[in-house]
């Protein structure tokens, strides 16, 4: 019985470490490229990056965080006013229906540091 308990504990420990692993390197590379494109004030670079990585702006921008700032605020803090104006349309004027009890957990926030 002790052996079974020990094996179960080791298996659960390994699974818990696998669940808390870092994000996929390709996703991290993509998000860093998106943050860099947002910091540039070049609309051409921004548009090409969004198209190349097939980013869905309506889904990603409300949750994307670059250096502990929202993506829009990150662009503004780097002086990218034209890029921020383009991002802004995805953040304002939308009507959404959301469950009042539902909150986006901290783990679901997409945070990128570079």
Image (cartoon, rainbow, N blue to C red):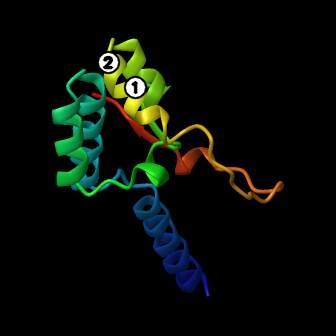
Q: Position of residue 55 (x, y in %)?
A: 32, 53
Vertical placement of 66 versus 104: above or below? above
Looking at the picture, tell me which residue is in the foreground, 70 or 82. 82
Looking at the picture, tell me which residue is in the foreground, 33 or 68. 33
Looking at the picture, tell me which residue is in the foreground, 69 or 40. 40
Q: Please rate how many residues cluster around mark 2, counting C-alpha atoms within 10 Å: few if below 14, some from 14 to 19, many from 20.
A: many
> SS for tag 1?
helix
Looking at the picture, tell me which residue is in the foreground, 28 or 76. 76
Determine contact: label 1, label 2, CB under 8 Å.
Answer: yes
In which image quadrant can residue 5 be found? bottom right
Q: Position of residue 106 (x, y in %)?
A: 60, 44
**Mark 1 and mark 2: Cα distance apart in space:** 6 Å
> SS for tag 2?
loop
Q: Quadrant of the C terminus?
A: top left
Q: Residue at label 2?
A: 80
Q: Is residue 82 left or right of residue 92?
A: left
Vertical placement of 20 versus 68: above or below? below
Q: Position of residue 61 (x, y in %)?
A: 46, 43
Q: Is residue 90 left or right of residue 114?
A: right
Q: How many marks?
A: 2
Q: Is residue 19 left or right of residue 47?
A: right
Residue at the image position 23 percent from the left and 41 percent from the top: 47
Q: Is residue 25 left or right of residue 13?
A: left
Residue at the image position 38 percent from the left and 55 percent from the top: 56
Residue at the image position 45 percent from the left and 55 percent from the top: 20
Instruction: Residue 52: give its label.
Output: none
Residue at the image position 30 percent from the left and 33 percent from the top: 35
Q: Please rate how many residues cluster around mark 1, counting C-alpha atoms within 10 Å: few if below 14, some from 14 to 19, many from 20.
A: many
Q: Quadrant of the N terminus?
A: bottom right
Q: Residue at label 1?
A: 84
């Amino acid at each position: 019985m002790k052996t079974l308990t020990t094996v179960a504990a080791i298996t659960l420990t390994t699974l818990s470490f696998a669940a808390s692993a870092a994000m996929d390197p390709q996703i991290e590379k993509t998000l860093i490229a998106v943050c860099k494109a947002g910091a540039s004030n070049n609309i051409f670079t921004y548009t090409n990056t969004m198209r190349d990585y097939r980013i869905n702006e309506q889904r990603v921008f409300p949750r994307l965080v670059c250096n502990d700032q929202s993506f829009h605020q990150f662009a503004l803090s780097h002086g990218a006013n034209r890029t921020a104006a383009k991002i802004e349309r995805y953040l304002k004027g939308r009507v959404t229906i959301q469950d009042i009890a539902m909150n986006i957990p901290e783990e679901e926030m997409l945070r990128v540091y570079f």
